Image (tube, rainbow, N blue to C red):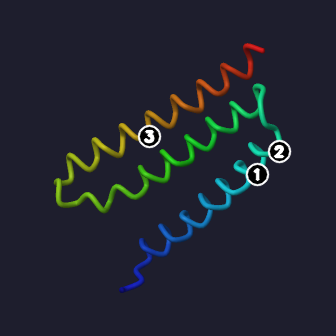
Amino acid sequence: MILTPQMTVYLFMLVIYIIILYIFDRARRKFEGGNIAMVTKMIILNTLLLLASDFTYLLDFLGPDMGYVVRMILRLAAMCAITIAGLRLIAV
């Protein structure tokens, strides 16, 4: 495996995503039930969708246009998830 600068950035982002997932999973377990747990679940979903969108470069066999479409759909879904979490928190 050749470690290019792009691959280094992706590995660093993977580490950051794992740290975020770990922190919010512990928070979800600590604050079970209620709105805080619901919001932390949506933040975890947001992080997973962003992680998936950042690693769509593996879909190069579909072509650059289709990879871009999948990446944008996943990013839009992540923005919707964090928006819904914010609205649920405000609606309390």
The residue wearing badge 3 is: 75
The answer to whether the residue labelled 2 contacts the one labelled 1, judged by CB atoms less than 8 Å apart, is yes
**First along the sequence among labels 1 and 3:** 1
Seen from the viewer's position, the closer of residues 24 and 34 is: 34
Q: Secondary structure at mark 1?
A: helix
In the displayed structure image, the side of residue 80 where residue 39 appears, left or right: right
**First along the sequence among labels 3 and 2:** 2
The tag on residue 30 is 2
Residue 63 in the image: x percent, y percent? 16, 54
- Residue 43, picture quadrant: top right
Residue 27 in the image: x percent, y percent? 78, 46
- x 56%, y 41%: residue: 45
Which mark's residue is nearer the viewer, 3 or 2? Answer: 2
Q: Is residue 78 above or below residue 19?
A: above
Q: Amino acid at mark 2?
A: Lys
Farthest-out residue, top: 91
Residue 76 in the image: x percent, y percent? 43, 34
Q: Amino acid at mark 1?
A: Arg
Q: Quick one: label 3, few (<14), some, or many (20+) residues within 10 Å? A: some
The answer to whether the residue labelled 1 contacts the one labelled 3, judged by CB atoms less than 8 Å apart, is no
The tag on residue 26 is 1
Could you tell me how far apart the alpha carbons at marks 3 and 2 are, in whole angstroms? 28 Å
Farthest-out residue, right: 30
Q: Secondary structure at mark 3?
A: helix
- x 70%, y 38%: residue: 40
Q: Amino acid at mark 3?
A: Arg
The tag on residue 77 is none
Q: Quick one: label 1, few (<14), some, or many (20+) residues within 10 Å? A: few
- x 30%, y 62%: residue: 58
Residue 22 in the image: x percent, y percent? 69, 57
For the N terminus, the image quarter is: bottom left
Q: Is residue 2 above or below residue 45?
A: below
